[in-house]
Image: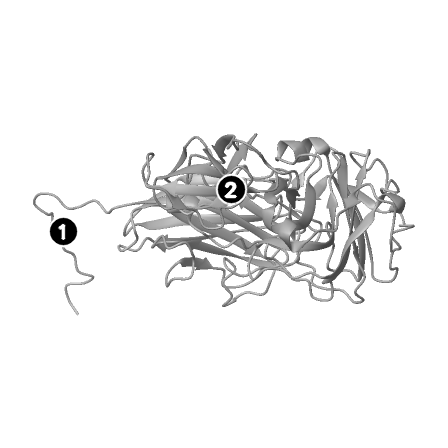
Amino acid sequence: MKKILFLSILFFSCFVIQVQSQVTVTVGTGTEEGRYNPIYTYYGYNYTQQIYTSAELNAAGAVAGMQINAIRFYWTGAGSLNNCNVWTVYMGETTQSSFTSNTSWVPYASLTEVYTGTVTLPANAGWFTITLTNPVTWNGGNIVVAIDENVPGYGPSATRWQATITANNTAIYYYSDNTNPDPSTPPSGTTTTTRPNIQFEMASLIPCAGDPDPGTATISSDTGCPGATITLSSTDATVGSGITYIWQSSPNPDGPWTDVPNGSNLTCATNTNSITYYRLRIHCANSGLWGTSNVVSYTPEGEVCLCGEYPAVYASSTSDEDISNITVGGWSNDSDCSTTAPGPGSINKRYANYTGTSVGGPIVMQGETVNFSLTQTSCGTGSYGNGFQLYIDWNMDGDFLDAGEQVYNQPTSASGNHTKTGTFTVPTTATPGTTRMRAVVVETSFPTSTNYAHTSYSWGETEDYCITIIPATPCDGEPTTGTASISTDVG
């Protein structure tokens, strides 16, 4: 339905599209897992709104007057859009910077329908694109993005979106199995500070002229894990129709230079396994002139414990079982239901990442037999059958799938709070260095053949630590035979 515009709809030719300078504007860098926005797939009908402020857009590289051609949300890889994949998307500009009550929806009259159709998730976790059928121009205000999902029937409960926790309630949602909300008169919703991360694909239609300015090239991090995603960007670069951006890389600060794949935007996501230098080249087709930015670099470093691509698998619920102590050898760590672990990606009462933190981890030797204990404490009022599993990535290949890497699998279920003890022997072939250790408590029947270091589950918790393996002490000098004994000397 046609509605009053805050955003000006532009109809344009294919030629104009080809000469637009594209800018990807990313708002939200958090790693929180959102459930309700942009939609909650576990219910049949959804209507949500999320506000992104002009200050955030400007800081991310947007310029008033640019055209928005597409938007993207980030799917964590959990769940699907089964029964939830037909969306109507509205956009508008608003003076609101947050939702102050459960009825303070941005009015329908301020919204413009920009897309109706099927939404498709990628094969793996990542951004998915919604290309607008009605591109709009940003006039410099706060942007509200509204999602109306009307497919009857509910989908999976596990679907999650990458989100950022904001200071105010910048998102609002409503879901129901029975009531299909009308965006023109939405019912009372629920406000939240958990707002989905978003990308706006924007373009300038103002023709470039003269010497194009490459701006100042920056890199999201100059050191980090080999193969980790890094973001190249440039501030204050020329934007306009006729502009072409080309990110280039080289193993040397002075070249020779090679174009970075998919590096034709002011922002560019890439990765490398070796020391690499980057620069931005910019070209104005109208003047024929080029510009070249400063050079930035990335140095890969880090151990497999921090840099390995271990699966992000953990509980989908915050209820019930939690790991409150893990002790391995002479090392120990306590935790509780109210404190979130300090490591990246941690989610209270679902996943605790202690890798690379001051908590440290155990040190064990090849061939050593190590004592351990695992303690479970309930974060709820119920008492259900559960059990522990403990894994160590002995060969440092970034998973817990190899023979012998499950060092403990509770033989029978326990109910309520409990502690389990045992021993494991470090393989003499274990790779020396610092690797990943994963402890899991899961509400299910034991014994089980399921590997819960790689399998999602509902109730319980996963905790990750670094564990250091040192080589066995080599023998030196004359070996001691010890004193021989015999059980009996007659018989």
Which label sits in the foreground, 2 or 1? 2
Q: Amino acid at mark 1?
A: Thr
Q: Residues within 10 Å of mark 1 (few under 14, many from 20)?
A: few
Look at the image and tell me in which quarter the N terminus lies: bottom right
Q: Residue furthest right?
A: 185
**Does 315 appear above or below 55?**
below
Question: Against 316, is 232 above or below?
Answer: above
Side (left or right) of 96 relative to 320: right
Please, what secondary structure does the residue beneath circle 2 have? strand
Q: Is residue 401 visible?
A: yes
According to the picture, the residue beneath numbered tag 2 turns out to be 245
Q: Is residue 49 left or right of residue 417?
A: right
Query: In this orientation, which residue lies closer to the viewer: 151 or 54?
Result: 54
Q: Residue at x 32, y 41 (%)?
A: 256
Coordinates of residue 235 in the picture (x, y in percent): 55, 31
Q: Which residue is mark 1?
A: 483
| Image position of 155 (left or right of 465) | right
Indicate the secondary structure of the residue bearing disc 1: loop
Instruction: Residue at 87%, 53% (x, y): give it.
Output: 2
Which residue shows up at 46% across the image and 37% down it? 280
Q: Residues within 10 Å of mark 2 (few under 14, many from 20)?
A: many
Q: Amino acid at mark 2?
A: Tyr
